Amino acid sequence: MTSVLLTSFEPFADDPTNPSGDAVRLVADGWDGEARVITEVLPVSFDGAAARLEELVARHTPDVVIATGLAGGRDAVTPERVAVNLQDARIPDNAGAQPVDVPCVPGGATALFASLPVKAIVRDIAAGGIPARVSLSAGSYVCNHVFYLAAHLAETRPGMRAGFIHVPWDTAHAPDGHPALPLADIAAALHLAIETTLATPADISVPAGAIH
């Protein structure tokens, strides 16, 4: 049976919740597809998240890894296209670590692309009436670190595909002035991302870049 590892993050930076975790739980509760979906909440810790992801991949040998996290300030669901081999933390992680100018994987490639059908995922989420667009930067915090490691692991495991999706705040918990989407829409977007990935072995070729 095809298996999908779907991860999220715990709250961080004094936030009371993390919509990625809440949405992933909704996806797990409502999943009725043929693939097996394994979910996990990762710690917001460079070392802890990396170790946990490696453990999960080794244990479950998933065909697909979709990691998710919060990008507060974004107004859409944003599948990430490229991860950079850089840890440059503006704030400490939940374990108190604040790496600066450190590679995610020493000796690894400068950047790695998602092997998910990112553009097709955006197309299908948008077709469902949920704001979505391709992102070309996952930052340099723990989200990018997990994305890079997942992409690196996929390179060493034939047949495994991996990527990352940033989600905005949910409307029930967004700080004042921050854009947000209903939690049900965020969960629906992640559900669609799984379905599209399983049905799309190679991404579509349509414009989705940015001018700046």
Image (cartoon, grey):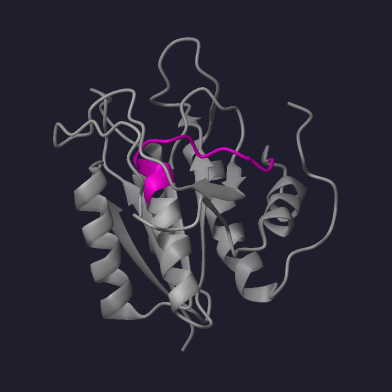
Q: Residue furthest top?
A: 177
Residue 92 at least partly seen: yes
Residue found 72% across the figure and 71% down from its top: 202
Q: Position of residue 18 (x, y in %)?
A: 34, 36
Q: Position of residue 187 (x, y in %)?
A: 50, 49
Which residues make up the magenta segment? 133-145
Q: Is residue 134 magenta?
A: yes
Magenta stretch, main secondary structure, is loop
Q: Position of residue 116 (x, y in %)?
A: 60, 63
Instruction: Examine the rendered structure and indicate whether residue 29 appears above or below residue 83.
Output: below
Q: Quadrant of the C terminus?
A: top right
Residue found 60% across the figure and 27% down from its top: 75
Instruction: Examine the rendered structure and indicate whether residue 45 appears above or below residue 211.
Output: below
Instruction: Examine the rendered structure and indicate whether residue 8 appears above or below residue 64.
Output: above
Compared across the picture, whether 203 is left or right of 178 comes to right
Number of marks drawn: 0
Residue found 68% across the figure and 50% down from its top: 125
